[in-house]
Amino acid sequence: MCRCCPRFEDLPPAEQYALDLGARLSAVARCHGALDLALGATLAPMFDRGLLCQLSYARESDYARERLGISPSEMHQCVRLARELRHRPILRQAVTAGAVSKRKALAVLPLAVGDYEGAWTEAAMRLSVRELESAAKAAGSAVPEERFEAEVVVLPMTPEQQDRLD
């Protein structure tokens, strides 16, 4: 500690309390990433299977506002993050540990793939969201293709039905 800063023990009780409270709030804020991932990981299969109607909700946005108490965009960010981080173990671990916030993870998501994942995760740990967005924009021309999942569905058809489809 530098000479100009008083020791924690020498501070008045109110300042000690404020510093302690600040440290606790920081710890809680770091847990947010893990909670957002858990929320997204729980909601994704629920949406994929169309289970909202069984809960008497017609739209995802209604469920977000009325049941979860969050905005639909925040809910969709959590779902997107959970889905995308399935394929990015390094970034997922950093978000879960609280080293990278949801906003930072979303900023580097398109770039943090394959061999680039470690470097972009490290950048997300040390740069601000604004700096990350600028760096991601600058690297945009070198963005690897985003990973996507596709499901193959085979439908039996008669030759007549195939002709109509073509």
Image (cartoon, helix red, strand yellow):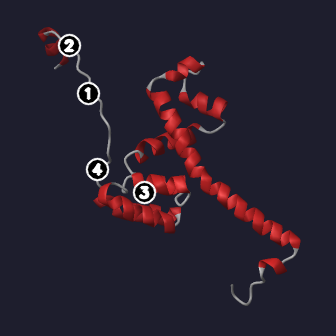
* Circle 2: residue type: Pro
On the image, numbered disc 2 is attached to which residue?
Answer: 156
Dot 4 lies on which element? loop
Residue type at mark 4 is Glu
Residue at x 37% of width, y 52% of height: 110
Please report whichever mark, 2 or 3, sits nearer to the chain's N-terminal start: 3
Residue type at the position of mark 1: Val
Mark 3 falls on what kind of element? Answer: helix
Q: Which residue is drawn at 56% across and 57% down?
A: 98
What whole-number distance in Å separates the C-alpha atoms at marks 2 and 3?
42 Å
Residue receiving disc 3: 108
Crowd class of label 1 (few under 14; some 14 to 19; many from 20; radius 10 Å): few
- Residue matched to label 4: 145
Is residue 138 shown above or below 106? below
- Residue 154 screen position, x and y as percent: 23, 20
Q: How crowded is mark 3: few (under 14 residues within 10 Å), some or many (20 or more)?
A: many
Depth check: give the residue in front, 69 or 92. Answer: 92
Residue at the location (47% across, 45% down)? 81
The answer to whether residue 76 is visible is: no
Element type at marker 2? loop
- Marks 1/4: CA–CA distance: 20 Å
Which of these two is toward me, 151 or 158? Answer: 151
What residue is disc 1 on? 152
Image position, residue 59 (x, y; %): 54, 25
Return the mark for residue 27: none
User: Which quarter of the rendering shows the N terminus?
Assistant: bottom right
Q: Residue at x 60, y 33 (%)?
A: 64
* Horizontal side of residue 47 vs 139, given as left or right: right
Label 3 vs 1, first from the N-terminus: 3
Looking at the image, residue 136 sits to the left or right of residue 160; the answer is: right
Labelled pair 2, 4 in contact (Cβ < 8 Å): no
